[in-house]
């Protein structure tokens, strides 16, 4: 599928999800909820989110360390630009933008950098699933599952399996590949042996560089450290959910502060897991639907659907807009355009575009 079709499919899915978001609530009450909100709390929430992005950058620095030591301050603009691209482009094309951009700026393999971003996504998923599993011990989440089952007509056990198993299997697989790189490459060689020789050589070169990016996972100690770094990434993002919750007076709905914070962390985790499907730009539409319904269905308090809708709309705007503005600022300062980065990133990601084992970082 070419890039143009991906863009249109992503935009179409986003439009469908946004339409579903609006037709399943009272629009007038949504406007009232947005009008009554106290937006004073939004800015400190965004500040916490940016601290989380800094921890994300620190984690990525450790993932890249075996290729080249890079200061966190130099990686931060690259991470922000990647987020900006994900927020504006469908199908998570921002990952390709980030891998190309860091390769161009820091003279590292773009393919290997892309594999470190893949590790990041899996670490994020495992961390969020851990939050859900731990908090699920004290909050009966079956109610949320049954609510999603009624709306999607998909058995909630199947929904849970569809979310947890792919991420878990993928994480275990990359740990295996990182621990046994030579054997993994030989397995791929055997699988693609029937292909034409030129294609085989190019694919193997791509695979070798991709496996190189997984080298940081050879050590279980490093895996543990990366997981520890993932905790503040999401706890600080959950802080944004908490502060926007104060904006909408959600803290007054819950019996106590603990229930309120637990609810916000669960909404953070479930919404981000559910909206991780690489489709709409920034997960627009799907994020709002999942976050809203999670907030409404959680048994900790009775939250009005219109209020929940206004809340998640402001949360998502607070996640997307700062990254877009800050990312554009960083691109302006370096006289680079997002369009050129996206085009080059897609070209570099195609294994058949060039021989990856001789890939240029210019």
Image (cartoon, rainbow, N blue to C red):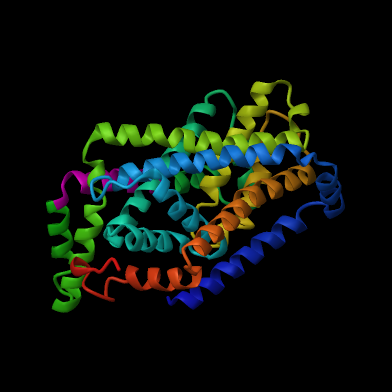
Q: What residue is at 45 percent from the left and 39 percent from the top?
A: 55
The C terminus - image quarter = bottom left
**Which quadrant of the view contains residue 297?**
top right
Confirm whether residue 142 shows in the render.
no
User: Magenta: predominant secondary structure element?
Assistant: helix
- Side of 344 relative to 206 (left or right): right
Confirm whether residue 14 shows in the render.
yes
- Side of 339 relative to 346 (left or right): right
Residue 347's x, y, as percent? 36, 73
Height in image: 143 above or below 274?
above
For the magenta stretch, what is the residue range?
A: 165-181
Q: What residue is at 60 percent from the left and 57 percent from the top?
A: 325
Q: What residue is at 42 percent from the left and 63 percent from the top?
A: 97
Height in image: 305 above or below 199?
above
Residue 45's x, y, as percent? 64, 38
Residue 159's x, y, as percent? 52, 47
Frontmost residue, 215 versus 328: 328
Magenta region includes residue 126: no
**Which quadrant of the view contains residue 341?**
bottom left
The N terminus - image quarter = bottom left
- Side of 303 relative to 124 (left or right): right
Frontmost residue, 15 versus 92: 92
């Amino acid at each position: 599928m070419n890039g143009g079709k991906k863009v249109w499919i992503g935009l179409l899915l986003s439009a469908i999800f946004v339409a579903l978001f609006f037709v399943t609530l009272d629009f007038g009450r949504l406007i009232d909820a947005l009008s009554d909100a106290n937006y004073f709390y939004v800015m400190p929430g965004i500040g916490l989110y940016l601290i989380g992005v800094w921890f994300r950058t620190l984690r990525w620095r450790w993932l890249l360390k075996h290729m080249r030591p890079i200061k966190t301050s130099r990686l931060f603009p690259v991470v922000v630009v990647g987020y900006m691209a994900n927020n504006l482009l469908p199908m998570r094309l921002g990952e390709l933008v980030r891998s190309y951009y860091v390769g161009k700026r820091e003279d590292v393999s773009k393919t290997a950098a892309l594999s470190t971003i893949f590790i990041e996504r899996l670490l994020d998923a495992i961390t969020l699933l851990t939050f859900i599993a731990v908090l699920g011990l004290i909050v009966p989440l079956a109610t949320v599952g049954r609510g999603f089952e009624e709306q999607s007509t998909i058995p909630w056990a199947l929904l849970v399996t569809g979310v947890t198993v792919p991420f878990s299997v993928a994480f275990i697989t990359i740990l295996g590949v990182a621990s046994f790189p030579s054997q993994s490459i030989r397995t791929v060689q055997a699988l693609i042996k029937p292909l034409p020789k030129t294609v085989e050589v190019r694919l193997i070169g791509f695979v070798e560089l991709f496996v190189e990016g997984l080298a940081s996972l050879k050590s279980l100690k490093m895996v543990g450290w990366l997981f520890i770094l993932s905790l503040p990434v999401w706890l600080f993002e959950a802080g944004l959910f908490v502060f926007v919750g104060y904006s909408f007076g959600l803290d007054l709905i819950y019996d106590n502060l603990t229930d309120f914070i637990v609810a916000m962390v669960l909404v953070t985790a479930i919404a981000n897991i559910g909206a991780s499907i690489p489709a709409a730009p920034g997960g627009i539409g799907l994020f709002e639907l999942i976050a809203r319904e999670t907030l409404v269905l959680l048994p900790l308090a009775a939250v009005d659907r219109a209020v929940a809708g206004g809340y998640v709309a402001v949360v998502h705007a607070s996640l997307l807009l700062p990254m877009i503005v800050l990312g554009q600022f960083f691109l302006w300062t370096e006289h680079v355009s997002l369009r050129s980065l996206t085009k080059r990133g897609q070209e570099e990601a195609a294994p058949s575009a060039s021989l990856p084992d001789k890939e240029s970082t210019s």
